[in-house]
Image (cartoon, helix red, strand yellow):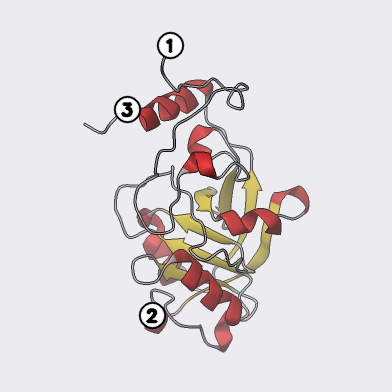
Amino acid sequence: MEGSNVGFLGHDQEQPRRPRCVAPGRCMVPMPLMKHVRRTPALGGKVDVVEIEGLDPIEALGSDWSDKLVGKGGLLCPCAPVVFDANNRNGAVAWGPSARGAIVVAVRGVASFEEVALNASASGARALIIVDNEPRWKNNWVMTSDTGTSPSVPTVLVPMKYGELMCGGRPNMTAAISRRPSKLSSVAIARNAVGRLLPPF
């Protein structure tokens, strides 16, 4: 399509693209400016998955600082206890001793992703799960640092519908976090790519 910036899989390095911001605002950056970042799950890139015994894998969005923390076989965090502290619901401060060696959970909405991740790091947590605070799940975000700091804990964002489970819905719950190839079909990837180019209705 002449004059457009639509690219095809396998040719995206050859097609010039105009910068386009990814909504919503905080911790989000224009995708074309982040060439070093992996392709988003919405466009067929790898996806981070929270695995809880007895449940289907939960697809999540990973932070850009998690990229360098991926281990052998895509492992981001081995099986560990999941800890939610109602007194630190939003992760705006460091967690207490129960966070050491655990996967801590926070609800999005007060502190930036980076601030929450740094608090998790300071608490000795192994990983951080952030529960989205909006009912409509958007899988095209890029969770990045405001300051260029690289927190030392893998961080993922999960849809709001998992909030009850993550925030104490199952006592003594353990989880693992890994990165896997996306299972999106080529049709779904193309639909998501076109959706980025079209204005919302």
Is 90 located above or below residue 193 in the figure?
Answer: below
Type of amino acid under label 1: Glu
Residue mark closest to the camera, 1 vs 2 = 1
Q: Residues within 10 Å of mark 1 (few under 14, many from 20)?
A: few
Mark 3: secondary structure: loop
Q: Quadrant of the C terminus?
A: top left
Type of amino acid under label 3: Leu
Q: Is residue 149 visible?
A: yes
Is 17 located above or below residue 146 in the figure?
Answer: above
- Residue carrying label 3: 198
Distance between the Cα atoms at labels 1 and 3? 16 Å
Farthest left residue in view: 201
- At x 50%, y 50%, the residue is 61
| Residue 68: image tag | none
Q: Earlier in the sequence, mark 1 or mark 2?
A: 1
Is 51 in front, or is 171? 51
Q: Position of residue 34 (x, y in %)?
A: 55, 45
- Residue carrying label 1: 2
Distance between the Cα atoms at labels 2 and 3? 40 Å
Q: Is residue 50 left or right of residue 101?
A: left
Q: Is residue 53 visible?
A: no
- At x 63%, y 80%, the residue is 124
- Residue carrying label 2: 86
Residue mark closest to the camera, 1 vs 3 = 1
Is 173 in front, or is 200? 200
Q: Residues within 10 Å of mark 2 (few under 14, many from 20)?
A: few
Type of amino acid under label 2: Ala
Q: Earlier in the sequence, mark 2 or mark 3?
A: 2
Q: Position of residue 197 (x, y in %)?
A: 37, 28
Q: Is residue 121 left or right of residue 86?
A: right
